[in-house]
Image (spheres, helix red, strand yellow):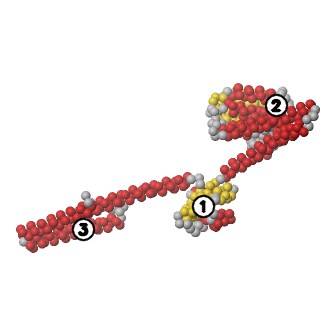
């Protein structure tokens, strides 16, 4: 029904009822009692209005604890509508609080730092990542000028110049931070920080790797090109020299081939697209084939023994064969003739271990931590003479990482070395 009618129809009916009652009493009892009756009814209605107004006032003062009355007449509808408004308000409030909590939680989990500054660069709010990146503490630094908190000349220039289209890279406390300011809402600004230390480190590793790989490939290539130039410029070269040149060229070409194969193996191992193949690996067969290859490489110059004392393991047979093979071939290549090499598969405390112990040249302590870096060699010429690529231990490390294992190295210069590949027992 039309709200105006809802209000006016009962009001007019009530007034008409009172007038009718007055007229009826006038007719029955005369004017004085009739007017008294009407007066009593009007006063009672007035008192009721005042009581409801008072209750409404009290409720408006403290809507939480005071309940709205049901009311009478037009008040019933007014109270019902107020009650509905209040419920709607409460619902909105609850939704807003929930959103705020969600937003706070998201900001807490965000790996990027977010700091909000007012128009004069005073810190208003920041999330924990921004506290960590910029060395801030919200409680302590709120209301302080950001340029006093981040006293970095480049950062101050960035803010003063206001060229915010480009992000700024800063080195703060040993970490690389990419900062960007985003103006918003009436001269307020958001400072977003991203920790790029890890990305930068990977990028640097990639650059180093490309530089090293190019250098490694350039050396044999220079030799091959040199001999080819001789062959072109001096067609009358005698057969023996030509043969010697060809054999040197073949040697260098094979070196390039080994390098490329090892680089491809490493890139396959690092690729997340190639998940680890899990199969039961017949470790005895793997270690025996590795030992056979090592004996072939040694050509009888070393005493190579094999001891298998552990169970089979889950993993990729091909990758484990390559890792174990690299350790065994290193032992042969870095152990002078007459030395001993012991290959052993055994159960450790909580893991399974493949170890290669040799009585070879050993390694100075200062080099041990860096041996698994790509192209790191203690003695470059010895590595090359023995057909090393400098990638063998990097491959071993990656294979073990993929299997949840690790490589440990115990060695001393002149005292031989023991390389132990540990794999989880399950
Ligand atoms: P490389 O192809 O040069 O052998 P690796 O990554 O396999 O490359 O090994 C890195 C370096 O670690 C070698 O150049 C060598 O100096 C050292 N190394 C590896 N294994 C042994 C070992 N059994 N005894 C002594 N030195 C070793």
Q: Which residue is mark 1?
A: 181
Q: Quadrant of ligand 1?
A: top right
Classify residue 174 as left or right of residue 242.
left
Image quadrant of residue 150? bottom right
Seen from the viewer's position, the closer of residues 383 and 160 is 160
Q: Nearer the viewer, mark 2 or mark 1?
A: 1
Residue 373 % position (x, y): 74, 43
Q: Which residue is mark 3?
A: 49
Q: CA distance from mark 2 to mark 3?
A: 110 Å
Residue 215 % position (x, y): 80, 44
Q: Is mark 1 within 8 Å of ligand 1?
A: no
Classify residue 193 as left or right of residue 91.
right
Q: Quadrant of the N terminus?
A: bottom left
Q: Nearer the viewer, mark 2 or mark 3?
A: 3
Instruction: Judge the density around disc 3: few (<14), some (14-19), many (≥20) Cα neighbours within 10 Å.
Output: some
Seen from the viewer's position, the closer of residues 82 and 370 is 82
Seen from the viewer's position, the closer of residues 361 and 328 is 328
Residue 29 % position (x, y): 6, 70
Q: CA distance from mark 1 to mark 3?
A: 60 Å
Q: CA distance from mark 2 to mark 1?
A: 64 Å
The numbered dot on residue 340 is: 2
Going 47% across and 55% down the picture, which residue do you hit?
A: 99
Instruction: Judge the density around disc 2: few (<14), some (14-19), many (≥20) Cα neighbours within 10 Å.
Output: some
């Amino acid at each position: 029904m039309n709200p105006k009618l809802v209000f006016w129809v009962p009001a007019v009916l009530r007034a008409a009822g009172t007038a009718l009652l007055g007229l009826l009493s006038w007719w029955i009892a005369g004017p004085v009692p009739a007017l008294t009756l009407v007066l009593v009814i009007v006063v009672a209605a007035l008192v009721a209005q005042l009581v409801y107004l008072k209750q409404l006032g009290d409720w408006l003062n403290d809507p939480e604890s005071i309940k709205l009355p049901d009311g009478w007449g037009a008040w019933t509808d007014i109270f019902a509508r107020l009650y509905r408004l209040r419920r709607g308000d409460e619902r909105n409030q609850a939704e807003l609080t929930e959103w705020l909590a969600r937003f706070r939680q998201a900001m807490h989990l965000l790996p990027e730092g977010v700091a909000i500054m007012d128009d004069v660069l005073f810190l208003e709010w920041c999330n924990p990542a921004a506290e960590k990146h910029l060395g801030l503490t919200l409680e302590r630094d709120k209301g302080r000028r950001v340029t006093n908190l981040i006293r970095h000349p480049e950062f101050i220039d960035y803010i003063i110049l206001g060229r915010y289209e480009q992000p700024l890279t800063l080195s703060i406390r040993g970490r690389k931070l990419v900062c960007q300011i985003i103006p918003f809402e009436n001269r307020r600004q958001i400072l977003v920080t991203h920790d790029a230390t890890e990305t930068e480190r990977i990028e640097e590793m990639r650059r180093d790797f490309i530089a090293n790989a190019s250098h490694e490939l350039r050396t044999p290539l220079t030799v091959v090109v040199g001999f080819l130039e001789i062959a072109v410029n001096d067609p009358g070269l005698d057969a023996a020299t030509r043969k010697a040149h060809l054999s040197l060229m073949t040697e260098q070409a094979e070196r390039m081939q080994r390098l490329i194969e090892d680089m491809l193996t490493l890139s396959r191992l690092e690729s997340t697209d190639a998940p680890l193949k899990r199969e039961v690996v017949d470790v005895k067969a793997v270690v025996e084939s590795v030992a056979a290859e090592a004996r072939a490489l040694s050509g009888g110059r070393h005493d190579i023994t094999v001891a298998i004392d552990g169970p089979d393991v889950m993993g990729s047979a091909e990758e484990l064969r390559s890792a174990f093979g690299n350790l065994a071939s290193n032992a042969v290549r870095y152990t002078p003739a007459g030395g001993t090499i012991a290959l052993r598969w055994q159960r450790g405390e909580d893991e399974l271990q493949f170890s290669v112990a040799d009585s070879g040249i050993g390694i100075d302590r200062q080099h041990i931590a860096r041996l698994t870096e790509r192209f790191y060699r203690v003695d470059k010429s010895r590595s090359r003479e023995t057909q090393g690529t400098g990638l063998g231990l990097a491959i071993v490390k990656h294979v073990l990482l993929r299997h949840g294992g690790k490589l440990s190295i115990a060695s001393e210069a002149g005292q031989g070395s023991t390389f132990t590949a540990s794999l989880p027992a399950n």
